[in-house]
Amino acid sequence: MDLDAYRRSAQAFLSELLAEEYRHYAGLKEDFAIEAVYERHGELFARGAVDSLRSLLDAAPDGSERRRGLRMLLEFAVDGLIGQATKAIEAELAGREASLSITVDGQQLGFRESAVAQANEPDPSRRMMIESARLALIDADLGSLYVERLRAQHDTARQLGFASYRDLCSDCKDYDLAGLHAQTSRFSAATEGVYRQVVEPALAATLGIELTELRRADLPRLFRACEQDCHYPAQRLVPSFRDTMYGLGIALGEQRGVVLDVEPRPGKSPRAFCAPVRVPGEVYLVIAPVGGRDDFVALFHEGGHAQHAAHVDPALPFEFRHLGDNAITEAFAFLVEHLAEDPEWLARRLGVDDAAAVELSSHARAVRLMYLRRYAAKLAYELELHGADADGLEPRGAAADGLEPHGTAADGLEQLADRYAALLSAALQIEWPREMFLADVDPGFYCSCYLRAWALETHLRAHLRGHYGAAWFESPHAGDELRALWREGQRLTPEELLARFSSQPLEFGVLLSDLGLA
């Protein structure tokens, strides 16, 4: 295999794919033409390419840079092979999401826009109406596509010789999913007794209710925290980010190739994202403004991604610039995002007084604990969903006349939906909807990237505060240190990156201390 040729083709494919994702999810084009992108670069993901990369990886010396890069290229090829199997499904899902709408009290809302409307809706009964309409639409119009996608992922894993999709991800991505699950389970157990006392003050301040009254439909409003809008003025959104970057020695106005897209438009995904089309030369940062704190959190998180991508050393090989363990870039994103709840930053950038800063930090702490427990439960669920014993998804003994088989497939799906609802309900101590059991799953165990990134970010933030003070975000020297880490792209593992500035192990339990719960 000509690795240089493979890298060039992979770079072209990924740039085209990310450009297509940017245009569609930013609401700039309705169709999602990823099938054509895959067809133009199909040779990247042929079984022969996967087998060749496997052979090269097996022959590469342990601990070498060649082995490091080959593992990333093999993961890319395997992900692409799965992408080939699911590309038509993904395109159909994106098209339906962009075109579907719900009707609430005679008002029509786009499916994607309805999440924003729910966050801004003060009436709890209307929030529930929006939620119910969204769930019904997911179940009726999108559910079968989610099932098709899941089966394609599982089938491809077996075709590659793995017992399960979980085993494929553990091997190709080199993730210790079982070890991470053990750590997050200990965290969940340790926070079980204090969860209510951390969360209820935020519920009282934002929604005027107790935990026993909380519903899934209320969460977007809780996270939106409209009562905090006076502290997060819309006119300060972009300037505060620009000033923060300037304090670190980064002049946004002089950065070529970093595009900030904060304009509201129909069809724009409510989920903020960063599209690094060419690293480091063409990076898009996209958010759909909701208002208040949510916008600051979204902009700063995606801004962290964008600055990481924009500062990667252009001389690095393709795989170190574009591939690797996404826990790295997520950690940088969480680091910048965390400023939106940092009392020192709130005072210096938004003029928030001490008393208000304490309230804002308390709310953010509650939301953070909810997210951590939710993602710990998601990991537990996905380990079951993608395990070898998940074959109950596959119909067995289907009749030739097309009649419904005596249906292990339907039964398996029902059991997974029940299991998903049970795990998430226990984690957040509210009734969680079954309908989301496949919609709430990102490919490739991405939930593990978030979990490890939260731990890595906690270590990094403690290091920056310890060396540069509480206002580390105003230190050009802190900026120099971050840029040195950013230049590495994702060449390093999270453990190796941590070793650059700390002798501590990467352990999820560090979040207990960070939340003041140790």
Image (cartoon, rainbow, N blue to C red):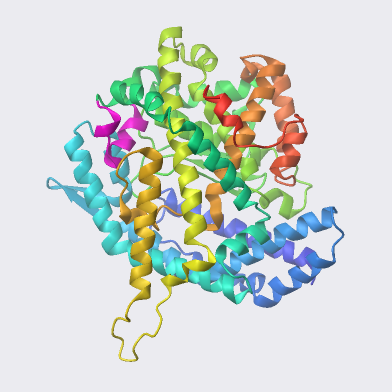
The answer to whether residue 241 of the structure is visible from this angle is yes
Quarter of the rendering occupied by the C terminus: top right
Residue 312 magenta-highlighted: no
Left or right placement of residue 356 versus residue 379 in this view: left
Q: Quadrant of residue 145?
A: bottom left
Provide residue 292's location: percent of width, then percent of height: 37, 26
Provide residue 232's location: percent of width, then percent of height: 40, 21
Task: Please state the extent of the stretch shown in magenta in the rendering.
Answer: 209-225
At x 36% / y 65%, what residue is drawn?
413
Quarter of the rendering occupied by the N terminus: bottom right
Magenta span main SS: helix
At x 45% / y 54%, what residue is drawn?
441
Left or right placement of residue 449 versus residue 442 in this view: right
In this view, which residue lies farthest toward the top? 354
Q: Nearer the viewer, residue 144 or 189?
A: 189
Provide residue 399's location: percent of width, then percent of height: 34, 88
The answer to whether residue 284 of the structure is visible from this angle is no
Q: Nearer the viewer, residue 76 or 95?
A: 76
At x 40% / y 38%, what residue is drawn?
263
Provide residue 258's location: percent of width, then percent of height: 59, 39
Left or right placement of residue 263 versus residue 319 in this view: left
Q: Quadrant of residue 397?
A: bottom left
Q: How many marks?
A: 0
